């Protein structure tokens, strides 16, 4: 299935979007995470494009989409507005058949499902987290806090310069840290280098970490509840039918970061686990995850 590269205007800004399948088919909005780009969904999209119109934007800060310098431009409200703008362009007046998110794209997908549940018929998350259980584990000072210390490193001023140095070698090292990237072909590598090479792209990507209010405890030093961002479970409820896909070998997001998720959802359909997949679940298991998505949406 051939991929098309298109542009969408959202509030006066131009976003790059990749699309697969018949534009008249039910829409799947695919939201990537750090440090990927819309093209990272290709192996999933080609397996679903016979039935769905798969649309994957380069999100704000990434690739050929807008890359503002200021941190405030990456607050979750702006990221959700971008996703709504894509939906308005591709499915005006109608809900997407599903929104699918991974990593930071999962955070946007959750926020979109919370803020505008009428814009999707279903939500699929792969190795991504709802903010309430994730903040709980980040603050606990335990294993997830330890696994997430890289967040504090990325938030520090100048981290983008270190990542971009040596022909983006720092970013490629972070991509592969404690992860299996044997799936990455030379064409994949060239695609990432192109996306990361746009002026301001590395800073834009890192600014997602700087803009989030989530707090990360030092290992063994829990943060008291009164010092954490206020999160009301009633206000952060996920109403669309929701399926979670999870690579158990993930060293960045641990299974405890999803504990209690079902209690935050109106219609949680459960977790499908992939023992051999790590954080790059959709690259390790494209056939199996696409089949699971297809069955869930049948």
Image (cartoon, rainbow, N blue to C red):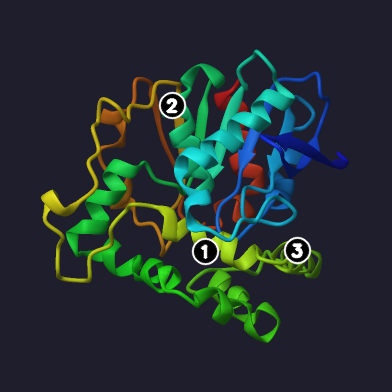
Measure the C-alpha gap from mark 3 to mark 2.
Answer: 34 Å
Front position in the image: 188 or 9: 9
CB atoms at circles 3 and 2 under 8 Å apart? Answer: no
Give the residue at mark 2. Answer: 115
Nearest to the eye among marks 3 and 2: give it: 2
Res. 292 visible in picture: no
**Secondary element type, mark 1:** helix
Q: Residue furthest top?
A: 93
Measure the C-alpha gap from mark 2 to mark 1.
Answer: 24 Å
- Tell me the tag on residue 94: none
- Counting residues from the start of the chain, the first of labels 3 and 1 encountered is 3
Nearest to the eye among marks 3 and 1: give it: 1
User: Which x, y percent locates residue 102?
Assistant: 53, 47
User: Which x, y percent locates residue 147?
Assistant: 34, 67
- Tell me the tag on residue 188: 3
**Residue 246 appears left or right of 291:** left
Res. 175 visible in picture: yes
Q: Is residue 82 above or below residue 251?
A: above
Which residue occupies 41% across, 64% down?
251
- Counting residues from the start of the chain, the first of labels 2 and 1 encountered is 2
Q: Residue furthest bottom?
A: 166
CB atoms at circles 2 and 1 under 8 Å apart? Answer: no
- Tell me the tag on residue 206: 1
Front position in the image: 247 or 173: 173
Which residue occupies 22% across, 70% down?
218
- Counting residues from the start of the chain, the first of labels 3 and 2 encountered is 2
Q: Residues within 10 Å of mark 3 (few under 14, many from 20)?
A: few
**Secondary element type, mark 3:** helix
Which residue occupies 75% across, 24% down?
51
Q: Quarter holding the C terminus?
A: top right
């Amino acid at each position: 299935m051939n991929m098309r590269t298109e542009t969408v205007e959202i509030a006066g800004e131009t976003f790059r979007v990749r699309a697969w399948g018949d534009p008249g088919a039910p829409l799947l909005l695919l939201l990537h995470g750090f440090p990927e780009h819309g093209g990272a969904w290709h192996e999933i999209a080609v397996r679903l494009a016979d039935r769905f119109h798969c649309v994957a934007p380069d999100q704000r800060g990434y690739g050929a989409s807008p890359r503002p310098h200021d941190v405030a431009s990456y607050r979750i409200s702006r990221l959700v507005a971008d996703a709504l703008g894509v939906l308005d362009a591709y499915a005006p007046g109608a809900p997407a058949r599903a929104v699918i998110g991974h990593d930071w794209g999962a955070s946007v997908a959750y926020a979109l499902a919370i803020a505008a549940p009428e814009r999707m018929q279903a939500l699929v998350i792969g190795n991504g987290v709802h903010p309430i259980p994730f903040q709980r584990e980040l603050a606990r000072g335990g294993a997830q806090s330890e696994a997430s210390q890289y967040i504090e490193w990325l938030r520090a001023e100048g981290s983008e310069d270190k990542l971009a140095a040596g022909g983006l070698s720092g970013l490629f090292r972070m991509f592969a840290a404690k992860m299996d990237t044997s799936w990455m072909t030379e064409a994949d590598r060239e695609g990432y280098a192109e996306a990361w090479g746009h002026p301001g792209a590395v800073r834009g990507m890192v600014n997602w970490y700087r803009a989030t209010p989530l707090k990360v405890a030092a290992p063994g030093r829990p943060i008291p509840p009164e010092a954490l961002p206020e999160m009301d479970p009633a206000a952060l409820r996920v109403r669309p039918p929701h399926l979670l896909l999870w690579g158990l070998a993930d060293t960045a997001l641990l299974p405890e970061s999803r504990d209690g998720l079902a209690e935050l959802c109106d219609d949680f359909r459960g977790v499908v686990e992939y023992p051999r997949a790590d954080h790059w679940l959709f690259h390790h298991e494209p056939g199996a995850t696409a089949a699971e998505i297809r069955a869930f949406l049948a």
